[in-house]
Amino acid sequence: MRKRLQHIYQKNLLRVQTVLLETLDFVLYWLTPKLRLYREANRKAPLILFLGDSLQARIPRMARYLRREGSFDAELLVKAGKDFKVFDTQTFSRVLTYRSRWHLRRILAGTHPDDVHIIHAFTLPSYQIKDAIDYTDIPVVMDVQDMHVSYFGLQSPKLYMRIDMPMEAYAIRHSAGIVSQSIELTNACRVYGIEQRPPTLIFPVYCDDEQILIPPEKQQSGEIHVAYAGSIAGSFQDDQHFGSMKLFWLIQAFASQGIHFHIYPSPTMRFGELILAEYREWDAKEPFFHLHKSVPQQQLAEELSQYHYGLLPFFLEDTGRSANKLGLGSSQKLYNYIEVGLPVIISQDLAFQSWMARRYGAGIEVSKADFSDIRRKLEEVDYAERRAHLLAQRDKITLGKNIPRLVKFYQELRSISQNSY
């Protein structure tokens, strides 16, 4: 109960702070000049401005390869106070922040097509994409990895999702182009009744060439080590939204079969200390469970390469999220595992990711019931064969190999935009 009350207090404190900042910046928007932040006289390459609310790991990776390819420069404009510094923001030539939606509009209104070639705006949420479309004359690319309409449909029990979904639909309809990390977009267009969407590039998260390792041979000691890297949830959070991320049952299932379970929690979890306190209690009493400190993306590969398997354990029966959300979406962690040569134990409910894992990452598809006897199932796996398959296939899904497709997409959209002026 105490953790639940702390959780409620922290959420409401954030809401109050947000309202105060929005009010201040509303006044500044109407009474002060617009901000022109992107005028760069000595810039050697056209600028791609990455814009979003909470920075996601795939974005700095994309920016690094874009700048290396040489056709574009890349800068980041992101919401202040969202822990974006845990990512490799050095890959951008400059990082700027905005405080509130009205502060963002003040920046966008002062941004000119001569200064910014393309705005690459990433979800969630979608308000910054809509505002970039409405407040600039710059082509806006909508980058889709998560979509609010996927979680519970149009009648979401979450007010913030219902507020965002009209903007999400607007962004799909009016963006110059869409970069889709999975097949989630197809369902969104169906639900929103969008028959003609903008030009779309299917561009999965992909592996980072710099993080690809040849993993050491695992000793035949009889021990099995399974690793999970990503967000987790606490017992005080609601099951409807967070149930599948409550991994206490997995700690028990693995421990009962003598399997070591390692969790590397996401460094960007909201209310992280409240959540981690519960997992630390399990770590203190269960010798087969190991809670590790969060590590940056640049260090994660070295950590994960120690283990035998990666894990994606999200099941429909544990959550109120729809089959569309689990089945059609994508995540960074799958590619983190593939980068370091870990075969992936993956839920059968994650249909798109399971297909990617089985094709490129030696995926082992499981039901939740399989975890009652997971050690036997893993011992039946020809580990050497799975590992060899993964190492042979993963070079096909690297950023270095695929970034020219994104460059070409930008160039085509800019050309279309200029011809429409």
Image (cartoon, rainbow, N blue to C red):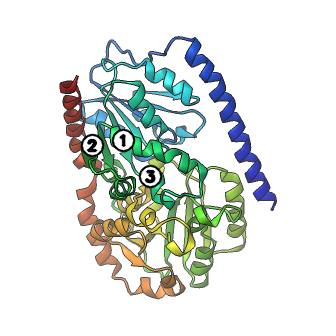
Question: Could you tell which of marks 3 and 2 lies nearer the N-terminus?
Answer: 3
In the image, residue 364 lies at what x, y percent? Answer: 38, 76
Q: Quadrant of residue 46?
A: top left
Specify the quadrant of the image occupied by residue 378. bottom left
Q: Image height check: is 61 above or below 358?
A: above
1 and 3 marks in contact (CB < 8 Å): no
Q: Residues within 10 Å of mark 2 (few under 14, many from 20)?
A: some
Which amino acid type corresponds to the residue marked 2 in the rendered image? Pro
Residue 61 appears anywhere in the view: no
Q: Amino acid at mark 1?
A: Met
Residue 147's label in the rendered image is: 3
Q: Position of residue 287 (x, y in %)?
A: 65, 74
Q: Residue at x 41, y 29 (%)?
A: 134
**Dot placed on the residue nearer the N-terminal end, 1 or 3:** 1
Q: Secondary structure at mark 3?
A: loop
* Residue at image mark 2: 198
Q: CA distance from mark 1 to mark 3?
A: 11 Å
Looking at the picture, does residue 146 appear above or below residue 419? below
Q: Alpha-carbon distance for marks 2 and 1?
A: 10 Å
Query: Helix or strand or loop: what does disc 2 sit on?
Result: loop
Give the residue drawn at x 62%, y 19%.
27
Residue 22 % position (x, y): 63, 29
Name the foreground residue: 275 vs 341.
Answer: 275
On the question of residue 419 being in view, the answer is yes
Asked if disc 2 and disc 1 are in contact, CB closer than 8 Å, the reply is yes
- Report the residue at 70% width, 34% height from top: 17
The amino acid type, in three-letter code, at marker 3 is: Met
Numbered tag placed on residue 142 in the rendering: 1
Q: Residues within 10 Å of mark 3 (few under 14, many from 20)?
A: many
